Image (cartoon, helix red, strand yellow):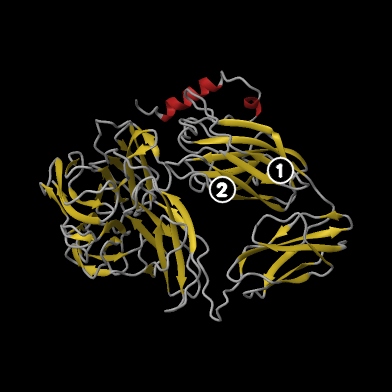
Amino acid sequence: MKLIPTPLRTLVVAIVLGMLPGSIYAQYCTPAYFQGCAIAGQINDFSITGAASTSISDIGTGCSGGSGIPVVAYLDHTSMSVSLAPATSYTVVTSTSLISITSTDVQIFIDFNNNNSFLDAGESVGGGTFLPLGAATNIPVAIPTGAAAGPHRMRVVSSGDATYPGISPCPTFATATIGEVHDYTVNIITSSCAPVTGLTVSAITSSSAGVSWTAVSGATGYQWAVTTSPTPPASGTYTALTAVTASPLAPATTYYAHVRTQCGTDYSTWVTSAIFTTLPTSSTTCDPVTSITMSSITSGGANLSWAAVSGAIGYEWAVTTSGTPPASGTLTTLTSAVASGLSAATVYYAHVRTKCSATLFSTWTTTPFTTLPASTCPPISGLTASAITTSGATVSWTAITSGSLGYQYVIDNTVTDPLTSGTNTTATSTSPSGLTAATTYYAHVRDSCGVGDFSPWSTIPFTTLAAAGGCNAVTGLSVSGITSAAASLSWTMASGAVAAKWVVDNNPADPTVSGTLSTTSTAAVSGLTASTLYYAHVRDTCGPTSLSAWVTIPFTTLSGTAGIAELNTGNAPFSIAVHPNPVNSTLHIQVSGIISSSATVTLADVTGHIIRHINITNVNSDIDMGSLPQGIYLVRYSDAGYTQTLRVTKQ
């Protein structure tokens, strides 16, 4: 079947929703999806504890989507309510029971003015990203000061298409593919007892911290608490002062300070501080990274990134299948890393710690993530950009005639893979307009072979033309001759350019340095590290101060000499061979040695994208490479005792 084009989907949903019964569709917008929550995006558990001993506990609801198109993935649970107070933060605990094929975000809305819309300013109150299968995900929800008292509808929206805070409270069949909506009721309660202001945590040591706040007129005292949870306690310790010392606290531990005003027998809402961390017991401290962000997750790899830590001279990172951090990791001076060679549909843990000296490290920070299922969906070929002007271009690709149901595309300014789904189309071209002159864009396209089954993204750069008198960018940037320590760059300079400048680094962002000058449209790069993702950046020079935009492409160095085993820890001789090489269509793989039950072969391009992933049980296996574009590919054999990678050229 083919994906339904967006205009037709819009017409279908308008007709179908006009026939839906039920009063819940008469006032608030109707959630409708192309796929709903059957494969991902399911809100399985939802709970929140509010004020006055009230709570919502909606557990094990499963997917609410029915059959047919559009899918109305919606639960009206407005009979369930919780009381919340203005100027107070609460924690929603939610989870999904499905292995998501795409990252799923959640956003929460409250209709404070009861106008049957969640689009007014201040009505988005929180959100975040689902943790992997079954894990409880804590979402902070902030009720604004001045929220109107009384009952209001709360809407919880999950999405596999958009990310928080950009999720729409009204998903439509025309634009939304994956997700679900739950509605509940919140009752805003008020108190004449004013909350504290100016809550501050200071003088933090390894075992104590000072907590202070501004006095409140009419207060008869205060209650305070310091806990490891952002959720305020039911009650705290009374004090008539406006400053206390919390002790004893555990070293190198994160805490929150909570304070509320006492007015006789009445209490204000709790005020909670920002998170703070006690110092390690060491006399010299090393702060941990605050969080790890996972992106570009595929069936065989993922990207890690984190914020820089003051005083750090570097970081160690690792990706393992255990939630327990390792004894040590891979050292980097960057704030990002690329994990490759992972298994499909597997839960992993990313670990990062700060290095402050040769012997001083912080505690580890750990984040779980799940790789995508292996896909046999063939990648895009023939991806090109043409008819480039100062404000537009045409991006086209070769049609895939077998197994394809359509395509997704994204046009952006980032060379790395998109973090969200793209625009669906059954055409083999798109013409973006309204682009900025003299700017480098990246066209990302992938094949869609069924529900949740996509090929890896294929990406090309293109640069819009400069205005009259400007300097146009290089074209045809490519990387060849890749080894474990070197590579060759080549490009074509634009008319009017007198030279080009190039940079090779580990950062996908535009370089902040000038670059190395070249007048030959080529560059030889050496001194690289094996099995490492690099980015080649090149721009034209049309004069002393006239420079084009940077053009960037990624490449990955090889692990060693092609055809030599990377790791051979078994007791028996072992090797693999491939033929023909170069190959036009079918690549034959021959194994010499004993094959274990866990043996797999993966085919990847030089950027690390996994294209094929097969389990093998025989000494002879085949991989069909007929539909792949020309270039260099990596064939990797792996089992419990052996790993070997070979380089293959596709003609």
Q: Please say if 521 is above or below 584.
A: below
| Disc 2 element | loop
User: Please, which residue is most extreme toward the right here?
Assistant: 264
Quarter of the image with the N terminus is top left
Q: Is residue 473 visible?
A: no
Q: Is residue 258 visible?
A: yes
286 to the left or right of 422: right
The residue that appears at 40% across and 57% down in the rendered structure is 320
Q: Please say if 492 is above or below 206.
A: above
Q: Tag 2: residue type?
A: Ala
187 to the left or right of 385: right
User: Please, which residue is most extreme toward the bottom here?
Assistant: 283
Q: Where, by quadrant of the figure, is residue 554 drawn?
A: bottom left
265 to the left or right of 457: right
Label 2 CA crowd tier, 10 Å (few <14, some 14–19, many 20+): some
The numbered mark at residue 609 is: none
State the image coordinates of residue 390 (x, y, percent, origin top left): 33, 49
Q: Please say if 592 is above or below 102.
A: below
Q: Which residue occupies the foreground of this view, 80 or 321?
A: 321
Could you tell which of marks 2 and 1 lies nearer the N-terminus? 1
Label 1 CA crowd tier, 10 Å (few <14, some 14–19, many 20+): some
State the image coordinates of residue 467 (x, y, percent, origin top left): 33, 54
The residue that appears at 72% across and 47% down in the rendered structure is 50
Q: Tag 1: residue type?
A: Ser
State the image coordinates of residue 154 (x, y, percent, origin top left): 66, 39
| Disc 1 element | strand
Distance from disc 2 to disc 1, alpha carbons, whole Å, reads 17 Å
The residue that appears at 50% across and 66% down in the rendered structure is 289
Residue where numbered disc 1 is placed: 55
Counting the numbered discs, the total is 2
The numbered mark at residue 136 is: 2
Q: Please say if the residues under marks 2 and 1 sit with CB atoms less than 8 Å apart.
A: no
